[in-house]
Image (tube, grey):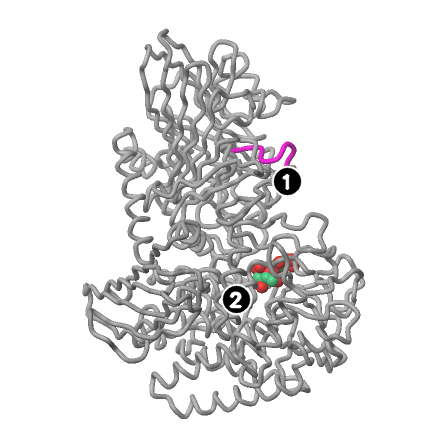
Amino acid sequence: MAKEYGHYDDAAREYVITDPCTPWPWINYLGTEDFFGLISNTAGGYSFCKDAKFRRITRYRYNGVPMDAGGRYFYIKDGDTVWNPGWKPCKTPLDFYECRHGMNYTSIEGRKDGVTAKVLFFVPLMTWAEVQKLTLTNTTDKVKKLKLFSFQEWCLWNASTDMENFQRNFSTGEVEIEGSVIYHKTEYKERRNHYAYYSVNATVQGFDSDRESFLGLYNGFDAPQAVLEGKPRNSVAHGWSPIASHYLEIELKPGESRDLVFVLGYVENAQDDKWESKGVINKRMARETLSRLDTAAKVDAEFKRLCQYWDNLLQIFSVKSADERLDRTVNIWNQYQCMITFCFSRSASFFESGIGRGMGFRDSNQDLIGFVHQIPERARERIIDIASTQFADGGCYHQYQPLTKRGNDGIGGGFNDDPMWLIFGVCGYLRETGDFSILDEPVPFDNVPGSEKSLFEHLTISFDHVINNLGPHGLPLIGRADWNDCMNLNCFSNDPDESFQTTENKTEGSKAESLMIAGLFVFSGRDYVELCRHLGRNAEADRAQKYIDEMVVSVEKYGWDGEWFLRAYDYFGRKVGSKENEEGQIFIESNGWCTMAGIGLKEGLCDKALDSVKEHLDSEHGIVLNNPAFTRYYIEYGEISSYPAGYKENAGIFCHNNPWVIIGETVRGNGKAAMEYWRKICPAYIKDQTLHKVEPYVYSQMVAGKDAFRPGEGKNSWLTGTAAWNWYTITQFILGIKPTYNGLEIDPCISPDMKEYKVTRKFRGATYEIEIKNPNGATHGIKSISVNGKEITGNLIPLFEEDSFVKITAIL
Ligand code: GLC
Ligand code: GLC
């Protein structure tokens, strides 16, 4: 059996890491709103409030040596031995180590020489602070005298300039120290109205706030001079690198335990209320927060509230089947990951630095389907934010910054799939909530006041953006790229200093068309038509349907390669993703979307396309993006051919798009194939944790494909559309519980060996307990359904009043 670094504890909803030396830092996220933290299994990581770039609270070094240096460290000096509860940074061998990653909290426990140190890290609900509750226990029969040092390094707020502008940064650092609280107030005296603080609920015997004084200039985090000598310097930082470290002398009787509550907080003051006295920051709000968190009992109560918050979120959808891996994925980890992508989009992970990308237009719309059932109000707000960055012609900024909610000029627009995702996201929201009032909401273009049109009109212009941008075959022009950011058919770059995605060296007369957008247009265009009909806007529905029908004809006529759907036409109008090509003959995106949309289903095109995907793209670890992989740079294709074969968009297993094929398989009723594909990429089924490398409890964006050096190796864990797409796929298309405008549709498509399962689903205020029975080993097609004991025809469970309890039995 392959080595395991940890295991699931489903009852506690935790992943338990038992070996600190994981093949890559295995992280978790703290915080539910505004105040967030990333924390690795050895307590590495950093915190920020609202925006990982502009309001970074603690410093982190990416891709450091050793890996994952910097974080929330406690140093325990017991005689001559110095150790940390999370093993790092000292790496003193521990007698016991365990890290439990739970729902927005992490607890790390280390034991050494008869002392147990357990730290619980979490952000209380509605609080701009992270709590670190440290419990020290003496398990020996002798008195223990320990020296404890805490440690955090401040970031000078802007995480980007913090890493660059040293001629300024080394002179700006400022702190204030009051009792056991160390305040970080760099730049507060000029334009900032925010500061951070780090406290402990006990009298300290010393402190440090200057990094060099604490560590020693040439020492690493593993050997702070102050700790090694057991003597804090009581340093007050002036410029250079401010830190926060408390020093406590602790005496523990045999068997005695002591709790200490450390709080890392952040405050924004009103402009006219910044100061307590000249040069002294106004600490009122910090004190208020600290008074709410100054005892272990208060902290425990806050922790309980956080756990209840998650109880509530996770009881909206749960499944009970014979497969515990399926259950834990659906009931815990997939939902959790969707919530994390809601909070962080693609900004901050151990693969996203938090200083690069803001929120993606396309990404955020897709993410919606993963969390709308849990936090519909916040989904509503997100939709309005996203739509407000759209242009009047239906195009969209590709990304926007969460702090300002403004479109990102540096990247601009021109990704021609973007507009359709708004329809996809909004219809997902409407099906879940039935809140049609959102469609009347006035929403501006490019955030310009006065430009508002209703959200419904935004959907119309999104739809029209595709039909206003058709190419010579009547297929959608691709623009800078479609879903595949790296399919840059108008880029033609010879200059390594140009961005593939924002450069279009050729656009005049471009014939570059996308079959992926065509499939998306048919699939989500039908959503638009259905919505129009639901609203009684039949003329608009007819108009839209006509364009969809035309698109289907164009795809069948110009988008079919004989055995599968083409991927695109390039700038010159030549086929991409055809058997005529030398490399990149077949792609996942167009075959996924066109089969999801059921284009040519009756004529057998979907069957052929899916069989070809199986033959050419399937592999042990999942479906690769294209085949054969590109082995040289194709200037006419752009970034996709820049990657080595088997990685990322060049024939990697993009876990994000595997669900399209899986849904395609459900369209043709092949539940066996659908579930087989799903299990291949689902983390709960990972066989070799060392090979997979990244966290085994969440999806990663990519797993190295069959052409890679190490097929099966995962990368870019956590922040990926994979979370929402797999959630959508497993719950709606495989388990088959689909929210619709008029009720829940029951339409499973499963593996024939799944004999029964039960889903509990809260929907529009009622609770549905749905039992699916499959006595004959079918894969799809409901034979009979009873609702509260009465047989119904069809498979749509109508809406029930709030608080009703509805019992459904469906037989396949
Ligand atoms: C990344 C991006 C997403 C894009 C995908 C494929 O996951 O976040 O927007 O669609 O890569 O290029
Ligand atoms: C890179 C990545 C792609 C991602 C894009 C976002 O091209 O390969 O996955 O979507 O950056 O800008």
Real-space Cα separation, disc 1 to disc 2, in angstroms: 35 Å
Within the image, what quadrant is residue 430 found in? bottom left
Q: Residue 792, image x and y in percent?
A: 25, 77
Neighbour tally class for label 1: few under 14, some 14-19, many 20 plus, Cα within 10 Å: few
* Residue 662: assigned label: 2
Instruction: Identify the residue at image location x=60%, y=33%.
Output: 170
Counting from the top left corner in percent of width and height, residue 419 is at 52, 74
Helix, strand or loop at mark 2: helix
Going 50% across and 70% down the picture, which residue do you hit? 670
The answer to whether residue 408 is visible is no
Label 2 neighbour load within 10 Å: few <14, some 14-19, many 20+: many
Which quadrant of the render holds ligand 2?
bottom right
In this view of the protein, which residue sits in the foreground, 18 or 519? 18
Quadrant of the frame with the N terminus: top right
Q: Looking at the image, can residue 170 be seen?
A: yes
Residue at 70% in and 63% down? 640
In the image, residue 742 lies in the stretch drawn in magenta: no
Q: Where residue 75 appears, x then y in whole percent?
A: 48, 21
Look at the numbered discs 1 and 2 and tell me whether their residues touch, using CB distance below 8 Å: no
The magenta stretch is 62-71
Amino acid type of the residue that numbered disc 1 sits on in the rendered structure: Asn
* Mark earlier in primary sequence (1, 2): 1
- How many marks are shown on the rendered structure? 2
Q: Position of residue 182 (x, y in %)?
A: 42, 28
- The reply, left or right, for residue 43 in relation to residue 143 is right
Q: Secondary structure at mark 1?
A: loop
Which residue position holds label 1? 63
Q: Nearer the viewer, mark 1 or mark 2?
A: 2
